[in-house]
Image (cartoon, grey):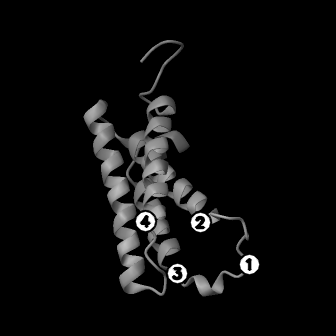
Amino acid sequence: MIKRFLLTPWPLLLWTVVIFFLLTINTGSMESAPKIKHFDKLVHFILFGVMSFLWVYASQQKGLSRFLFIFICVAAYGAGMEWVQENFTSREFDSMDIYADAAGSAMGVIAGKKIGPYGNRGRNQN
């Protein structure tokens, strides 16, 4: 049942809304956030990694061009969200967040390709 749900566009759409919400909320209310150096980069990496994983998992097409398209779209969404943060919220633009978004997107595409429903079916199969 979960696998069939993941093959629909709904998880990706819901996750896109979650990312939008999380990246546009006022961070002044997040005093309880962990005080780990660069923790926000890890959050960006995970958010956009999950997003590209969901897209690859639900994608009915395979091939390098499809994976590249997904990577570019997710990374562009991350860059766009930085612009939204700068212009419409009290948060600031951070180019390192864009790198974290792109790195997460790349890892999500790789993970989706490897463990998705159309990924490797066994040892040494590509």
Label 3 belongs to which residue? 25
- Local SS, label 1: loop
The residue mark sitting in front, 2 or 1, is 2
Residue closer to the observer: 76 or 4: 76
Label 4 belongs to which residue? 95
Q: Is residue 79 above or below residue 103?
A: below
Which residue is drawn at the image coordinates 34% and 68% (left, top)?
80
The residue mark sitting in front, 2 or 4, is 4
Label 1 belongs to which residue? 32
Label 2 belongs to which residue? 40
- Local SS, label 3: loop
For the residues labelled 2 and 1, the Cα–Cα distance comes to 13 Å
The residue mark sitting in front, 2 or 3, is 2
Which residue is drawn at the image coordinates 47% and 49% (left, top)?
103
For the residues labelled 4 and 3, the Cα–Cα distance comes to 19 Å
Query: What's the residue type where badge 2 is placed?
Result: Asp
